Image (cartoon, helix red, strand yellow):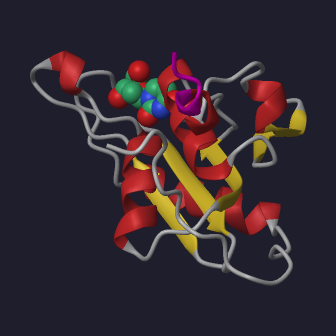
Amino acid sequence: MSASPSVSPSSSGPPPEVDWAALREDARRVRHHAYAPYSGYPVGVAGLVDDGRIVVGCNVENASYGLALCAECGMISALHASGGGRLVAVACVGPDGEPLMPCGRCRQLLWEHGGPALLLATARGVVAMSDVLPDAFGAEDLTRRT
Ligand code: THU
């Protein structure tokens, strides 16, 4: 097995401009499709891909509570299912439609698919993933072997 995964190639050309209002609206809209009968806590997320696509996700829970899939998991699956690429900007919202900080596991997921420069809409404004997940573990770390 290779030491590090082959990361989806970035599209060539300048990164697309971020329409934060539209991204937040997409996140708000998709949260209505969440399957969250156990927590009653629907989450929606929308991400702008480097080729201009928008991918979305919502949380999907399970009677076996620990199997719940966060909204970000669905979005990352949609990213790959629709052709891959790198995330440029993400807006995640909770039940009230306001920004929700991704959980620790999902920060790691976002890091994998957007890296330190990925921008995230938060309650304190737009911040980079390097701020949201400092000192992150990533694919490069796998190249350090004894
Ligand atoms: N949830 C997400 O979808 N994303 C997060 O980053 C935090 C939590 C979901 C999981 C669960 O369905 C519900 O919110 C309550 O924790």
123 left or right, relative to 142: right
- Residue 40 visible at all: yes
Of residues 68 and 130, which is closer to you in this image? 130
Up/down of 33 relative to 116, above or below: below
Q: Is residue 50 left or right of residue 13?
A: left
Report whether residue 93 is seen.
Answer: no
Residue at image point 75% right, 49% down = 118
Query: Which residue: 72% across, 24% down?
Result: 133
Quadrant where the image shows the N terminus = top left
Asked where in the image residue 41 lies, by quadrant, the reply is top left
Q: Quadrant of ligand 1?
A: top left
Residue at 53 percent across and 30 percent down: it is 142
* Residue 97 picture location, percent across and down: 62, 43
Horizontal side, residue 68 vs residue 12: left or right: left
User: Which residue lies most toward the bottom here?
Assistant: 13
Predominant secondary structure, magenta span = loop
Percent across and percent down for residue 100 are 64, 32
Q: Is 91 contained in the magenta span?
A: no
Residue at x 10% of width, y 24% of height: 63
